[in-house]
Image (cartoon, rainbow, N blue to C red):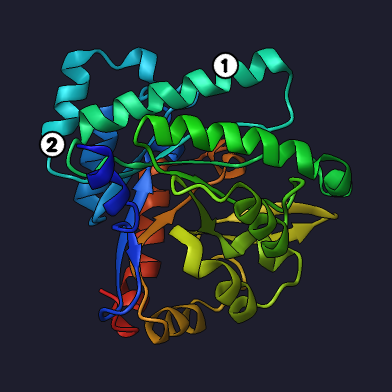
Amino acid sequence: MTRREWIGALAAGAAFGAPAKVRLSIGNYGMQSLAVNAALALIRKTGYDGAELCLMPGWPSEPARLDPAARRGIREQPLPVATLIENFNLLVSDEAHAATLDRIRAAATLAHEIAPKQPPILQTVLGGRPPDWEQVKDRMASRLTEWAGVAEENKLRLAVKSHVSSASDTPEKLLWLLEKVSSPALGGIYDYSHFQLLGLDLEKSLNQLLPGALFITVKDGKMAAGKAQFLLPGEGTIDYRRYFELLREKAWNGWMLVEISRQLQTAPGYDPAAAARRSYEFLSPLLRQAGLR
């Protein structure tokens, strides 16, 4: 893929104008106990349209654990790998920041090896704490510029998102960073679960972030004793009917990723197959009713 072809494909994952259509995916982030091929088979059998691979240390799909045969197996299996997930932090030491840049390079190599025609998007959170935003935002923008530069050099799309517990916790903060960096390789993620916990309006936040979102992440959540507690889609109070009506009205096309939070993964009795199935059985009928599948 040439750089011209890559730039032209940057918006392929999400677009407006055509009739709305959502492709539903889930990752092996919530399936750490399963081998990569077993996780992909489970995702496909459940009915999902695509998958995400977790590249974090300790997961079976960590790049260092995937030899050429494993990468070829991922490339040749039928389920599209739409996204990759990492857990980076902009506010780390210079040494750790350099290691992050190497991890972005490793993700890019993997992305092109497992899906040469349409390399998956790499997503991450950004780190920091909400009270520190004004003091750290310029440093975050500078570091994010470096992340995006390495991503562009390696023909990788990088997607970042706001998190209720991070310095960039609101749509306005995320937009500020995206506009400050202004890289063709960089885009946002729309994940309303974090904004819901802050009491932010669904439609307003959607209008702010959807135009620049490379994909959507869905889960649910609630505040418990002043702390965010994330849940499976449909187990909280997000109005998914209204949410999907808005997506249809905006004629949004792209991937919708189910995220199983680490809180749920580490809870007693957690079953990755059951979590994937319950999420699919809740979301898929609602997407069909909204005319999005």
Report the quarter where the N terminus lies. Answer: top left
Q: Quadrant of the C terminus?
A: bottom left
Residue 157: quarter of image? top left
Residue pointed to by mark 2 = 77
Which label was assigned to residue 79?
none
Which image quadrant is residue 75 in?
A: top left
Asked if 25 appears above or below 248 in the picture, the reply is above
Q: Give how far across and how far down residue 252 sits, in percent.
A: 37, 74
Which secondary structure lies at badge 1? Answer: helix
Left-right relation of 170 to 232: right
Q: Position of residue 193 (x, y in %)?
A: 61, 62
Q: Position of residue 123 (x, y in %)?
A: 48, 42
For the residues labelled 2 and 1, the Cα–Cα distance comes to 31 Å
- Residue at the image position 30 percent from the left and 32 percent from the top: 111
Left or right: 229 with respect to 276? right
Which of these two is toward me, 256 or 264?
256
